[in-house]
Image (cartoon, rainbow, N blue to C red):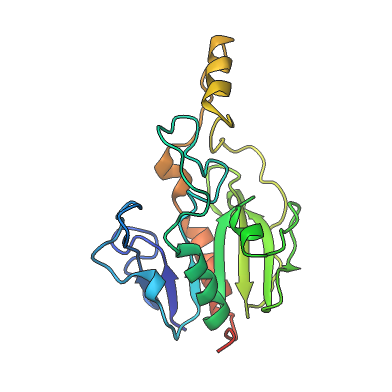
């Protein structure tokens, strides 16, 4: 079964040049977002027919949606040029799975039930969606990287639930620049953490898990 991988690096990412995978990137329309894949098919324009694996950008939905401790200007929560909304529509229409960081503000924004940290699938909405929390550390990531999944039409198989111990940190955990500066002044040394590329990379085992979930889909609402 062919799967459409949405919001991915169509040239160098883990989905590129895979048999049975149709890659869709995304390009800015209003000049306010980083222009990632301007010369590729825009994932916001996807109209089927294949089930999807969706990786909508998360910068404006995560803990640091305002820009983080070092931001020079404050951003707007949810200002992702419509990427998450389009990804949610695609999963509901054609089946498949969407992934976002744990505690994503997109879940309450779009009326989705938050999953339990400990794992297990739960009903997410009235559109046939289900949701869960899974650690990418069980599937090849160097950190825990707690991740929320939203899926429609899939076989809700058991995943490896719960924490994945003994891994590196995604970041140092500071919520503001003042908090970080205060810790430095108190003598706290920088903690070992992953680079941005290491944080955002989808490990091959996790990619394969998402593809298998999408391929188990019996379709969405169409």
Q: Is residue 116 left or right of residue 202?
A: right
Residue 159 in sight: no
Which residue is depicted at the point 66% across and 58% down?
Answer: 108
Q: Please tell me which residue lies in front, 49 or 11.
A: 49
- x, y percent for residue 172: 55, 30
Tell me which residue sits at (71%, 58%) in the image: 114
- Residue at x-position 51% and y-position 67%: 85
State the image quarter where residue 134 is shown.
bottom right
Query: In terms of image quadrants, where is residue 214?
Result: bottom right
The structure residue drawn at horizontal position 46% and vertical position 54%, both measured from the top left corner, is: 79
Q: Quadrant of residue 26?
A: bottom left
Which of the pair 207/99 is nearer the observer? 99
Q: Is residue 4 above or below residue 142?
A: below
What is the number of callouts on the image?
A: 0
Position of the C terminus, as image quadrant, is: bottom right
Residue 29 is left or right of residue 133, and the answer is left
Eyeballing the image, is 13 above or below 69? below
Q: Position of residue 80 (x, y in %)?
A: 45, 57
x and y percent of residue 42 in the render?
A: 34, 69
Where is 217 relative to 134, above or below? below
Quick check: 154 above or below 194? Answer: below
Counting from the top left corner in percent of width and height, residue 220 is at: 58, 83
- Residue situated furthest bottom in the rendering: 222
Q: Could you say which is closer to the camera, residue 99 or residue 108?
A: 108
């Amino acid at each position: 079964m062919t799967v459409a991988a949405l919001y991915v690096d169509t040239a160098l990412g883990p989905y590129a040049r895979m048999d049975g995978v149709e890659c869709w990137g995304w390009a800015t329309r209003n000049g306010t977002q980083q222009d990632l894949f301007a010369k590729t098919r825009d994932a916001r324009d996807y109209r089927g027919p294949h089930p999807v694996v969706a990786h909508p950008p998360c910068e404006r939905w995560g803990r640091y949606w305002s820009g983080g401790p070092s931001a020079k200007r404050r951003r707007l929560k949810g200002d992702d040029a419509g990427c998450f909304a389009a990804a949610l529509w695609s999963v509901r229409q054609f089946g498949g799975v969407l992934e976002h960081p744990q505690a994503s503000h997109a879940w309450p924004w779009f009326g989705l039930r938050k999953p339990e940290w400990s794992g297990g699938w739960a009903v997410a909405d009235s559109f046939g969606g289900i949701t869960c929390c899974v650690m990418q550390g069980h599937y090849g990531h160097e950190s825990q990287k707690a991740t929320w999944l939203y899926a429609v039409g899939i076989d809700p198989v058991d995943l490896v639930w719960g924490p994945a111990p003994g891994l590196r940190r995604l970041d140092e955990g500071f919520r503001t620049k003042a908090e970080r500066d205060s810790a430095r002044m108190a003598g706290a040394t920088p903690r070992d953490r992953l680079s941005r590329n290491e944080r955002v990379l989808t490990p091959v085992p996790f990619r394969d898990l998402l593809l298998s979930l999408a391929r188990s889909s019996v379709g969405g609402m169409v």
